[in-house]
Image: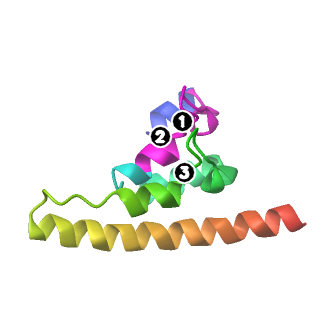
Amino acid sequence: LLDLIQAFPNGPAEPDDRRMLPIHMACRIVCKEDVLRLLLKQSPSSVNAEDIKGRTPRDFLAESKRDNQSKVLQKVNARNRKNLLKILKEFEQLEVERLQS
């Protein structure tokens, strides 16, 4: 990911044909915390970005529950979702502060 961002610094802010940003996909698959932090540091405003259906990264985390996973994977994903939601909340607050200044 670091190599991609170095080669394409604006990549985290580039939407696809559905107006989804990399952060949407990262939340959809319940990525690692460091991946989410890196994407948000590169594109802080993406924390509230909406796709073509009006979904935000937070919405994708809420939708990421999968019934076909084992109980262990469900617990791991639940913990990861909780941690990712904390990171999103942190960056949402920073974005609010940035917009107010």
Residue type, mark 3 in image = Arg
- In the image, 55 versus 31, the foreground residue is 55
Q: Position of residue 80 (x, y in %)?
A: 33, 68
Q: Secondary structure at mark 1?
A: helix
Residue in view at x 22 percent, y 58 percent: 66
Q: CA distance from mark 2 to mark 1?
A: 5 Å
- Image quadrant assignment for residue 81: bottom left
Where are the magenta residues, as a range?
Answer: 8-26
- Image quadrant assignment for residue 89: bottom right
Q: Which residue is mark 3?
A: 55
How dense is the environment of label 2, judged by Cα within 10 Å: few (below 14), some, or many (20 and up)?
Answer: few
The correct choice, above or below, for 78 with respect to 54 in the image is below
Residue type, mark 1 in image = Ile
The correct choice, above or below, for 39 with respect to 78 in the image is above
Nearer the N terminus, badge 2 or badge 3?
2
Label 1 close to label 3 by CB (< 8 Å): no
Q: Secondary structure at mark 3?
A: loop
Residue type, mark 2 in image = Leu
Q: Position of residue 100 (x, y in %)?
A: 88, 67
The correct choice, above or below, for 78 with respect to 42 in the image is below
Q: Position of residue 6 (x, y in %)?
A: 55, 33
Q: Which residue is mark 2?
A: 2
Q: Which residue is mark 1?
A: 5
**Horizontal arrangement in the rendering, residue 52 relative to residue 44 (left or right):** left
Quarter of the C terminus within the rendering:
bottom right
Label 2 close to label 1 by CB (< 8 Å): yes
Q: Position of residue 13 (x, y in %)?
A: 63, 38
